Amino acid sequence: MDISKVANIVMVDTATLASTSDAVVVGTLRDWLVGDKVSTRSGADVGAAILAQIEVDRVVKLAEGIVLNPGDIIYATLISPTMETEKIVEALPVGLPMAAYLGGPLTPEQLAVNDALVVEKGDSAATGQPRWVPEAQGFVVVDPDDPSYLIWPMLGSRQAATLDLTLPGGLLDGR
């Protein structure tokens, strides 16, 4: 998917990415949950979210006041500019090792939308759970077809490497 006409992603090195993230974790993609779908009152699609359920295996960095431990389950919200979130689920099966640079968790106020939009609620399994927001550059999974490669699904990038090279101070940042 080419999103270049609607988004600009400023690429930074892994140390800078970590400094602006509330948490950096290594974990396992446990499930995909359907997130909320948003449209205008007139019925025009705005976009959809899909929730990556991640089991934290290792906490690499935490901002002050944030608590995460190995074994915790977190929900990372990936925003899709289309309503076709199924393509992400098909391409990235559960069980994949991954790393994530996260902002959040978001408050209910931050998740609210204005009255001009209609929200179709997603999977109830994540209701009430904190929602984290991964940086586009900071959501990386092991390629299910070749574990010697990594995929940055929100960047459309794929490179030969290990997850450790994507962590703070590592040489690989999805470019």
Image (spheres, rainbow, N blue to C red):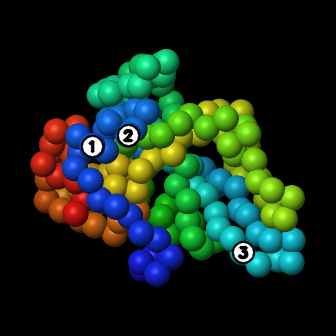
| Quadrant assignment, res 83 | bottom right
The answer for how far apart the CA atoms under marks 2 and 1 are is: 7 Å
The kind of secondary structure element at disc 2 is loop
Q: Nearer the viewer, residue 131 or 125?
A: 131
Q: Are marks 2 and 1 in contact (CB under 8 Å)?
A: yes
Question: Of the residues shown, which amino acid type is indicated by label 1?
Answer: Thr
Q: Assign the C terminus to one quadrant of the image.
A: bottom left
Judge from the rendering whether residue 142 lies leftward or rightward of residue 75; answer left or right. left
Is 117 located above or below residue 122 in the figure? below
Residue at image point 18% right, 62% down:
159
N-terminal of the pair, mark 3 or mark 2, is 2
Look at mark 3 in the image and give the residue it sits on: 45
Residue at image point 69% right, 45% down:
111
Q: Give percent across and percent down for residue 66.
A: 48, 22
- Count the numbered circles shown: 3
Look at mark 1 in the image and give the residue it sits on: 16
Q: Assign the N terminus to one quadrant of the image.
A: bottom left
Q: Give percent across and percent down for residue 56.
A: 40, 30
The answer for how far apart the CA atoms under marks 3 and 2 are is: 31 Å
Mark 3 residue crowding within 10 angstroms, few (<14) / some (14–19) / many (20+): some
Circle on res. 167: none
State which mark lies toward you, 1 or 3: 1
Question: Of the residues shown, which amino acid type is indicated by label 3?
Answer: Asp
Is residue 125 visible in this depiction of the protein?
A: no
Judge from the rendering whether residue 38 lies leftward or rightward of residue 55; answer left or right. right
